[in-house]
Amino acid sequence: MVLATCTLNARQADGISVIPRPQSVTLLKGTFRASGAAVNCDPSLDAKTQQAIQRFASQLFLASGKPSSFAAAPGIVETAKAGNGRGFVFCRDSSLEPEEYTINIQPKCAIVSASDFNGFLYAIQTMKQLLPPAVYSKDAGSETLTLQCMELRDKPRFRYRGMHLDVARHFFPVEEVKKYLDIMATFKLNRFHFHLTDDQGWRVEIKKYPLLTEVGGYRSGTMIGRDFSSDDGITYGGFYTQEQIKDIISYADHLGITVIPEIDLPGHMLAALSAYPELGCTGGPYEAWHKWGIAEQVLCPGKPKTLPFLRDVLDEIADLFPSEYIHIGGDECPKVEWEKCPDCQALINELGLEDKDGVSAEQFLQNYIMTDMQNFLATKGKKIIGWDEILEGDLAEGATLMYWRGGHPEVANSGYDVIMVPTDYFYFDYYQVKDKEKAPVSIGGYLPLEKVYSFEPLNEVKPENMDHILGVQANLWTEYIPSNEHLEYMLLPRMLALCEDQWCTPENKDYDRFLKDVIEHEFKVFDVLGYSYCKEVIGDPAL
Ligand code: ACM
Ligand code: ZN
């Protein structure tokens, strides 16, 4: 029998609604009944993958009310490949790249292939998006679940697909962090950048320095709205114990997400100084900051305890987080105190640092700290990521840059590995609607959905440097975001535009198709899942 087929490109394929848009889809005649379908898998798949497949079977059962049996039995794959399969069959195919997957849906059998855990997860996420939004529900339903027959092939454009969360300015409980990870996983993001420390709060337990969280985890007041002269006088704070961090890491791991912690140093350290004032240039007293901005008080590298303190902190962080990368910040470190501090100046002399080629001795002192931490982390088998300021002066080989400031193409072409996070496209703390009166107070700026979507990661990059672009990320700074609802509202739907920047080749991107999928399908998914999101993207005068 010859089946009528039609190969669709992104513009034409309005028969399916999947974000990020899969690389290629060929729709075939016929449908596959997913309600009550058996879910079978290759018994050689590891336990974590089998659990994920079993969870998919449970979701089908819950949404349809028809039991979907799960089996990992020998011979299942061979039978399916011989054309006699029934139900879903999950097969290992080691010829596929990491994170790549294929789905071949025929009337009696849906064959899903991948070579690794993330590939299988992404196939499941794609199939869930092909089904009615009820498959996301935690409530039992009686939906008829059918899939259009098709051949689908998919893999990501970039291997680093990140989303950041600042839990220092406002603290978010473990359950909300998990919800955030769930949202990321639905759209195939695989790196969670966890900004754990800043001037306004220290949020991760460090056993050797308990005051970091006991003292530095709390501030005695917060400015109100955008009024820098105000203070609510209310104690605010919180932190994650190391056990809670392990729980978050394990939860993320089951969603195919690596958690990359950030300890922002040597600036953005006022909360740490409030706990250990002897690490500052003046000795304090210091307080976790009540205001937003860039504090001038930073760690003093000239004090004997400072570098050992940082190594000790990173030692615990490296042991706690399995990630090969540890983010050590390096942004926005004012040098006014170092210029005046006898201990800093003595260290500058001892190291023989001086102003050179427009770079100050104090900047070279910051390079000295970053390199010391990079070398220390290398002894623990870890690599560093830093904000793009770490490129100023000297930067050791092997560092990865997070390019946030934009307008510095030398960063993208530096020869270091780079993650694209330009403020103008990926700072999700900016307003997403033109009429700011319609939105909760935010830091300012204007970043609508369409602008996020319009980013092309390789635009500034010379051909010889393209392999250094690891991927793309958006940042969610939380100075003006005190609640879970507000957090989700700032994230959604912009994170969906981000995910197509990360996943899709330029030929597979199309804003009209994307917007239609967002409005007609994903908003319903958000409703089922109970996420807050910005609905005003439609009809925004700027679009
Ligand atoms: C940053 O926004 N300070 C990285
Ligand atoms: Zn100093």
Image: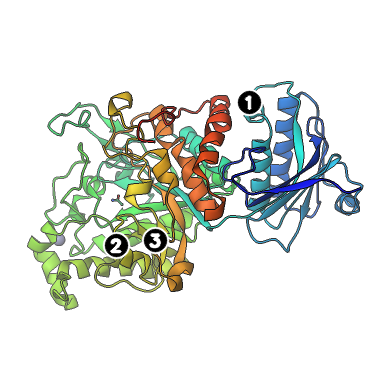
Q: Amino acid at mark 2?
A: His
Report the front residue among 175 and 428: 428
Report the front residue among 422 and 150: 150
Check if mark 3's residue and mark 2's residue have beta carbons within 8 Å. no
Separation of residues labelled 2 and 1 (CA atoms): 46 Å
Which residue is situated farthest in the bottom direction here? 352
What residue is drawn where x is 55% and y is 43%? 187
Q: How is the image coloured?
A: rainbow
Q: Earlier in the sequence, mark 2 or mark 1?
A: 1
Q: Which residue is mark 1?
A: 138
Q: Amino acid at mark 1?
A: Lys
Q: Earlier in the sequence, mark 3 or mark 2?
A: 3
Q: Give neighbour class at mark 3: few <14, some 14-19, many 20+ (Cα, 10 Å).
A: many
Separation of residues labelled 3 and 2 (CA atoms): 18 Å
Q: Quick one: quadrant of the C terminus? A: top left
Assess mark 1: CB under 8 A from ligand 1? Answer: no
User: Percent position (x, y) of residue 197?
Assistant: 32, 47
User: Percent position (x, y) of residue 292?
Assistant: 22, 40
Q: Quadrant of residue 526?
A: top right
The numbered disc on residue 385 is 3
What residue is drawn where x is 65% and y is 22%? 139
> Is residue 379 visible from the viewing direction of this image?
no
> Is residue 515 visible from the viewing direction of this image?
yes
User: Percent position (x, y) of residue 100?
Assistant: 65, 56
Q: Which residue is mark 2?
A: 408
